[in-house]
Image (cartoon, rainbow, N blue to C red):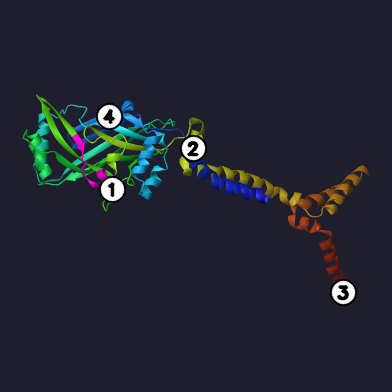
Amino acid sequence: MGGAMVAVIIGIIWFPLVFFSLGSAVGETNVPYDVTLEIRIGPYEPIYRMSAQSNSIYSFKPDQLDQLRMVYNNFKSSGTFINNYEAADVAAVKLSIDSGNIWGISPPDRKRMVAEINSTNPVQVRLDYKISHQTSKPEDTGIIRKGVAITLPAETEDRANLLKMLEGLPADPVLLQYLLPKFIKVTNRGTVEPVEELMLPQPDEKAASLRNITTNLNKTGEEEWWRIREECNDTNYELFLRDLPYQDCSNSIILYTFNDKVFPPTLEFISGGGIIGLYTTLVLVASRILRGFFSDQCGKIMFEDLPNVDRVLQLCLDIYLVREASEFALEEDLFAKLVFLFRSPETLIKWTRPKEELADDDEDEDPEDGAGGDH
């Protein structure tokens, strides 16, 4: 019994860990079916918005994953991260460098934007990305949103170039530092995070996971649209990025997603609450079962585990005997004695001691009886 209980406790402890660690083996590939990128300056109309659907999202093939491993062959932490994924779990997302929408800012908003950029106040630039993937949870929409924000300080060359663009003057592209997430980890818990392991370590956390981009305003007739480009002249690009599958710095914005597998619908009812939820469920169920088992035993143990029931059995037989002899008054006395025994655990324990203990008690009582007789 004790060994079985230990085995059950070990099973409760290890089952959630083993179950979720096998998720990569029994889970299903879950590459995003839509990735949307949006860049906004201040509170105004987004300057860039572009989406990639399934035909622009490419799952890696085994040889492409091998190529990715070769690029990071000399970097242990990068290799460890990549080895957590199979080829089908890694995807390249291809976005156009040109915004999918004409910039439709109203004239009053444009004037306010020009005034804000021309002021001495810092201007915020925000990039929001939205990743949509399949989910088997009814309460989960499968849409994950994340954002990155930077600040353009006043009286800088980039602020000056941005102001020139809005005023219709020739200007160099505006540099937006540490804004673009190049590598994105998509978890099965509904979260996304930029990956730091696939670029050179930097003191600044953003520099280790985000890329620089440039942007400029284009105009044809009365229509305006924005174009962005990834900056491809840094050490990370020379060491790693230029050799990655699908990389195209001239004509596209390429992002890479590393996607956790999801449990199939048949196992979703177990894994839906995550490892903490599974632990909580197991502990509550096990405690309820054990409590019910032992609470029932507590009321029976003093009756089922008595060491020597011969005297109690003899009392019961005497009750049957006097009943057959129609000695009802004596039967009533004997039955009252039996009821008293079971209502008094202390007396019942004394009555049901092993025979050896009863003999010792009798020997202890004999000298006292003798002393009493002398008096």
Image location of residue 185, percent across then percent down: 36, 40
Q: Which residue is found at the position 16% from the left and 32% from the top?
A: 226
What residue is pinned by disc 1?
208
Quarter of the image where one finds residue 233:
top left
Residue at mark 1 to residue at mark 4: CA–CA distance: 25 Å
Quarter of the image where one finds residue 171:
top left
Q: Which mark is residue 25?
A: 2
Q: Is residue 236 magenta?
A: yes
Q: Which residues are magenta?
A: 228-239
Residue nearest the observer in this picture, 44 or 16: 16
Q: Is residue 18 magenta?
A: no
What residue is pinned by disc 3?
371
Residue at mark 3 to residue at mark 4: CA–CA distance: 106 Å
User: Mark 2 Cα within 10 Å, few/some/many (few <14, many 20+)?
Assistant: few
**Tag 2: amino acid:** Ala
What residue is pinned by disc 4?
51
Q: Earlier in the sequence, mark 2 or mark 4?
A: 2
